[in-house]
Amino acid sequence: MKDLKLTAKNGNGRTIVKVGKTEVGKGFAIIAGPCSVESEEQTLETARAVKEAGADMLRGGAFKPRTSPYAFQGLGLKGLQILAKAREETGLPTVTEVIDPRDVTWVSEFTDVLQIGTRNMQNFSLLKECGKTEKPILLKRGMYSTIEEWLNCAEYILAEGNPNVILCERGIRTFEKYTRNTLDISAVPAARELTHLPVIVDPTHSGGRASLVEPLSLAAVAAGADGLIVEVHRNPKEALSDAEQQLTPAQFSAMAMKVRKLHKAMEGI
Ligand code: PEP
Ligand code: MN
């Protein structure tokens, strides 16, 4: 990969992205929460549950990039205010997606981490705006993108002066239909050997089914991932988006325990 300058790994030093008390790239970071912020009660209840289960950060979308323009688009400002309230109550730092370059500055005031979604990975204006902030950026891999294209997008952010990038493998489109996307597990060690950036996995949008979240999470740990971002809803059946793939708080709690155990065991190998 000839064009990587700022993200390229040289030597053994790895970037650690600090988000509150969590150091992404050191230990194993778990981000959990609903696909979308739907209401104050739903978000707060889920936030309390994921905190109780040992999550390090809370996720929740206020701007939803939906395939259909008629699907729930997120609560926007109100969603960000709810997320900020959940952070205040639980102390969990928050992660939320930003989809428009014009929103980067003001959305930054409500959250600890800005997420760039798969559909916006190559939105170069958005990458540049995010690069001008000091906020940690969670950069998802485009569902049609090569590893090289993905890493070049991280390069855009670093080139603007923001070194705080967390890479996220979230599955790519293949001919397989049973799963929503195909988790490219090889992207985890590949991105870690090519760059010094932390690499996390989204087992939720890759498999697209709640039953696959735990095995994919364990595979991510075994592949050397630095963390996970997982969708959890207090009542997945009633979710306004991604109902079939969100975990209940109880499922998440059981999964997080296994993930932590495996990560600990891996440290001894
Ligand atoms: C999300 O995490 O809310 C999301 C929309 O994910 P992706 O961009 O990976 O589809
Ligand atoms: Mn989702």
Image (cartoon, rainbow, N blue to C red):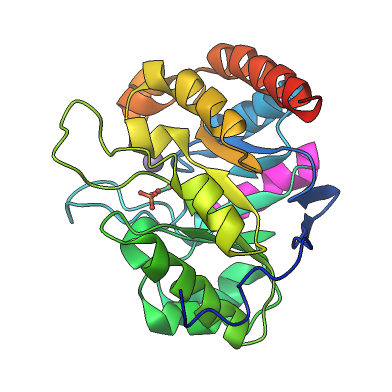
Question: In front: 268, or 126?
Answer: 268
Who's the residue at 29% across and 46% down the image?
Answer: 72
Q: Quadrant of the C terminus?
A: top right
How far across and how far down the image is residue 1, in percent? 46, 73
Q: Position of residue 223 (x, y in %)?
A: 56, 35
Q: Residue at x 60, y 88 (%)?
A: 160
Q: Quadrant of residue 198?
A: bottom right
Q: Residue at x 61, y 72 (%)?
A: 8
**Residue 4 point in image, percent of width and height:** 53, 78
Q: Quadrant of residue 226?
A: top right
Magenta-colored stretch includes residue 81 = yes
Is any atom of residue 240 visible in this view? no
The stretch in magenta equals: 79-91
Residue closer to the observer: 255 or 174:
174
Work out whether 209 lies above or below 144: above
The answer to whether residue 26 is above or below residue 3 is above
For residue 266, say whether it is visible.
Answer: yes
Q: Is residue 148 magenta?
A: no
Q: In the image, residue 31 lies at what x, y percent?
A: 63, 40
Q: Residue furthest right?
A: 21
Q: Main secondary structure of the magenta part?
A: helix
Q: Nearer the viewer, residue 160 or 219?
A: 219
**Left/right of residue 90 with respect to residue 110 in the rendered view:** right
251 relative to 206 in the view: left or right: right
Q: Image quarter for residue 148? A: bottom left
| 145 with respect to 30 (left or right) | left
At x 59% / y 75%, what residue is drawn? 106
